[in-house]
Image (cartoon, grey):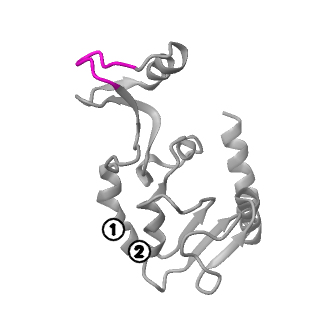
């Protein structure tokens, strides 16, 4: 499973299979009532907040509606809790890209894997408990680093095609 703390939904836009994606802190593609849980259209919630300057209200119970993101102190999505221990146990490689590794509990996931599992950090700076003694640290821009890796293993043309297909839609 791919786990992301991003709430912008870029992984979904990029075509990552939703069945293989755990958006640990939720996303902005949907919204729900904080009281009754009724679903609401994200665009309607956004329009209420940004265009009208009003807090969106539930059309069923009148309570507040918020995007389906996890705010500080809120419980993580059930899928995260259901999958994280299984995924950590089954992991044979950890790839971490572009992060400060400061937001728990996701920041701790690289530490939960077995000590013989290789960990690779692609980032502008070393982060979390990654170290150049135990791990592979590729310093620099994530996009450039991923492109370099793909070219090294012969996937450059496939990456270019994937990029082209994604941006032609």
Residue 97 point in image, percent of width and height: 61, 61
Residue 12 point in image, percent of width and height: 52, 43
Relative to the observer, which residue lies in front, 23 or 157? 23
Of the two numbered discs 1 and 2 on the same chain, state the one appearing first in sequence.
Answer: 1
Extent of the magenta region? 56-64
Disc 2: which residue: 112
Relative to the observer, which residue lies in front, 18 or 69? 69
Residue 31 point in image, percent of width and height: 39, 30
Is residue 8 depicted above or below 99 in this figure?
A: above
Residue 137 point in image, percent of width and height: 67, 75
- Seen at 35% across and 48% down, the residue is 73
Q: Is residue 112 left or right of residue 122?
A: left
- Seen at 24% across and 17% down, the residue is 60
CB atoms of marks 1 and 2 within 8 Å: no
Q: Quadrant of residue 58?
A: top left
Q: Does 63 lie within the magenta span?
A: yes
Q: Secondary structure at mark 2?
A: helix
Q: Secondary structure at mark 1?
A: helix
- Of discs 1 and 2, which sits in the foreground? 2
Disc 1: which residue: 86
Name, please, the residue furthest toward the top.
Answer: 52
- Callout 2: 10 Å neighbours few (<14), some, many (20+)? few
């Amino acid at each position: 499973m791919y786990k992301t703390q991003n709430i912008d939904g870029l992984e979904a836009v990029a075509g990552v299979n939703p069945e293989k994606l755990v958006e640990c802190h939720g996303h902005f593609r949907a919204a729900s009532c904080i009281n009754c849980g009724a679903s609401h259209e994200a665009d309607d919630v956004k329009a209420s907040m940004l265009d009208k300057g009003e807090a969106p209200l539930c059309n069923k119970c009148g309570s507040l509606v918020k995007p389906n993101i996890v705010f500080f102190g809120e419980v993580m999505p059930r899928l995260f809790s259901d999958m994280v221990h299984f995924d950590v146990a089954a992991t044979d490689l950890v790839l971490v890209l572009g992060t400060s590794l400061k937001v728990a509990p996701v920041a701790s996931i690289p530490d939960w894997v077995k000590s013989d599992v290789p960990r690779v950090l692609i980032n502008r700076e070393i982060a979390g408990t990654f170290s150049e003694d135990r791990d592979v640290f590729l310093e620099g821009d994530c996009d450039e680093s991923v492109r370099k890796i793909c070219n090294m293993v012969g996937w450059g043309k496939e990456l270019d095609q994937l990029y082209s297909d994604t941006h032609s839609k």
